[in-house]
Amino acid sequence: MKSDAIRIMMRKTKTLLLLAVLVLAFLAHLYAADIQCIWTDIKKIVAVGDIHGDYKAFIKILKGTGLIDKELHWTGGRTHLVQIGDVLDRGDYAKEIFDLLMRLEKEAEKAGGKVHMLIGNHEELNITGQIFNREEFTLRQLVSFLPDGYREKQVKKFRKILGNNPTKKTGLDSSLDSNLMPFWENMYNELRTNRRHPARSEYISNFNKIYGKWILKQNAVIKINNIIFVHGGVSEKFSKWELKKINNRLRVELEDLRRAAMNFTQPRIPDYRRQIVYAQDGPYWYREFATKNQDDFKENVDRILNNLEAEYMVIAHTPKVIQTKEDMQLFQGRIWIIDTGISEPYRKYMRGRLSALIINKGKFDVWGLDNEK
Amino acid sequence: MKNKKALIIMIFICFFSGTWVQSKSQAVTQENAKQKKLENFLRTAKIVSKRRAGGRGENWIISLDDGKISRYGFFKLLDATRPDALIPDSYKYGIAAYELDKLLDLNLIPPVVEREIEGRKGSLQIFIEGALNESVRRMKNIKPPDPEKFKNTMEDLSVFENLTYSPSFCGERELDDILIMHKKDWKVWRVDFSEAFAPSPELIPECEITGCSKKLCQNLIKLEDEKIKAKLEHYLNDEEMSMLLKRKELIIEKIKKLIEKKAEESILSS
């Protein structure tokens, strides 16, 4: 009788312990989802707009603003670098930019500085695998994010068709030999229309395993001192949310889609229950600040910044041709637009230029107006 | 028993406001003829030029001319449908919404057809020019000349948005998809249903139905499921279709309950 009671008690204790562990795990998960998104007392901030795969331009800007040295190591000290999203697409070298950002993130941290890469709409398009049939998706980007094993296997196949001797050279550059390009082009054209093309799943899972996972540790909206940084803009609706809530909810929704894309399963959150991902008024698709009439929308801007307890907002997403510092300012300098068409396709076709916004002790300055070579 | 009585009353109200229906029927026929003409124009007019339009997908503004009239069309190419697409957004949902709008005789959506341009299939819709969007109207606090009529149209729109599960003005959403011909007759258009027809078995939580026109109520009750299936099955999958039909029943039920609670005059507008 007594032993039965002890057994029951022990079972209850076990259940309670298990419950406690589960609760703790859940709380830990919640805590982990909270990534810092507000900083104060930061002396120097350098913000860079949409890079769109232009590695060379990015290096030039980082060197020009004194954030890296010749060997591409962090020299920015306690500066905060904000890359405002849209590293991917249009240009070819997004992988190289991500690799650099991931390394600089660690180096800056050690020096007391910080590298922020904000989530842009093109990051969403790649994480969720919605990019393939869009014209901004480039062939080199496709090849660069394919897993090494899969890429090498394809190269072997291509060389066999060509009748070439197998080469010992491996790596991305050798995969992109000019005689192999017609094969890649063929694959690229096929997968753009064929949803079931195996290269699509290889791309999605490899991209997400490394880069998607890292992107999901970043924020979409941050506040440094009294300035909001966001790829598209914070709409009135989301200005009523806490920044932490915007970022956490976004990460939950994007992570759900990342897993679904990688595992070919249905997302757990149905599309009609999503609040931020792909929302026209979400932080990286919103375009109203760049497109609305400034007189008509001024009161909204004031209200939004008031809700966010901020003085300024730095946005990108909509490329703007600039000649002067004033060209980057909207709504009497309360909104700064830093997508100046940095990447090569924009410089070629729309008079884009390299730029960076430097905020030093509260003073706004622009790199790239006279010092671009 | 009580419910049955309410339903009979509702059907009575909807169907036997006969004089109203008769007086409107001529206008309806004219509208239908105009719609058909524009559909034909969209299908056959020559493409004069095209330029990129904004938006999250690939959209074009196309200049069209059939020798008699020139209009702009909005060509939408994105075609990511459920269940394959993780983020559904398809021109096909826009066409499905238009077909449903026609079945209900609402005339809230500008004519849109499926057309192939330069080897690519998409939807081509009459581009509404010179309109004020609801977002700007509210921002500038521009009052409609007939507030009652405007309110009734918005109520019908709310019903239709619940039916298609495509919220535009409920909660704190953006209102740019509601276009108002403020310089003419204050006709209201609703564009962009490309994310519509979510397979939700419920109505939109933040988009409450508060009333609807007698005409829409009548047409909703009258509209057979088979007719909807026949017109929309090309664009919707089975789940989207069955949830659409379910929401139709929920809307009828909702209106029935509203009539039960309040006087029918305050629920059904003429």
Image (cartoon, rainbow, N blue to C red):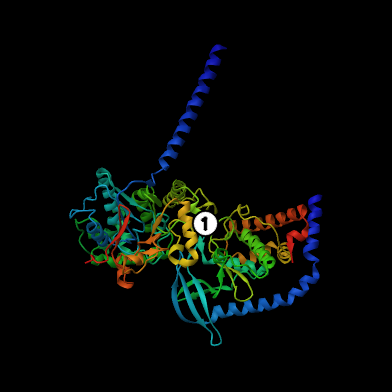
Q: Nearer the viewer, residue A2 or A29?
A: A29
Q: Position of residue A97 (x, y in %)?
A: 28, 56
Q: Residue at x 74, y 74 (%)?
A: B24
Q: Residue at x 50, y 26 (%)?
A: A16
- Quarter of the picture containing the C terminus of chain B is bottom right
Judge whether A110 appears above or below A228 on screen.
above
Which image quarter: residue B223?
bottom right
Q: Position of residue A156 (x, y in %)?
A: 26, 58
Residue lying furthest top in this view? Answer: A2
Judge whether A326 appears above or below A217 on screen.
below
Q: Position of residue B66 (x, y in %)?
A: 54, 85
Check disc 1 and give the amino acid type.
Answer: Pro
Q: Nearer the viewer, residue A17 or B168?
A: B168
Residue, disc 1 = B83
Q: Nearer the viewer, residue A190 or A47?
A: A47
Judge whether B103 appears above or below A94 on screen.
below
For the residue labelled by badge 1, is the local secondary structure a helix, a strand or a loop? loop
Which image quarter: residue A124?
bottom left
Judge whether B118 appears above or below A203 on screen.
below
Q: Is residue B96 visible?
A: yes
Q: Nearer the viewer, residue A143 or A371?
A: A371
Q: Is residue A215 left or right of residue B32?
A: left
Q: Position of residue B200 (x, y in %)?
A: 59, 53
Q: Residue at x 45, y 39 (%)?
A: A30
Specify the subunit that label 1 lies on: B
Which image quarter: residue B99?
bottom right
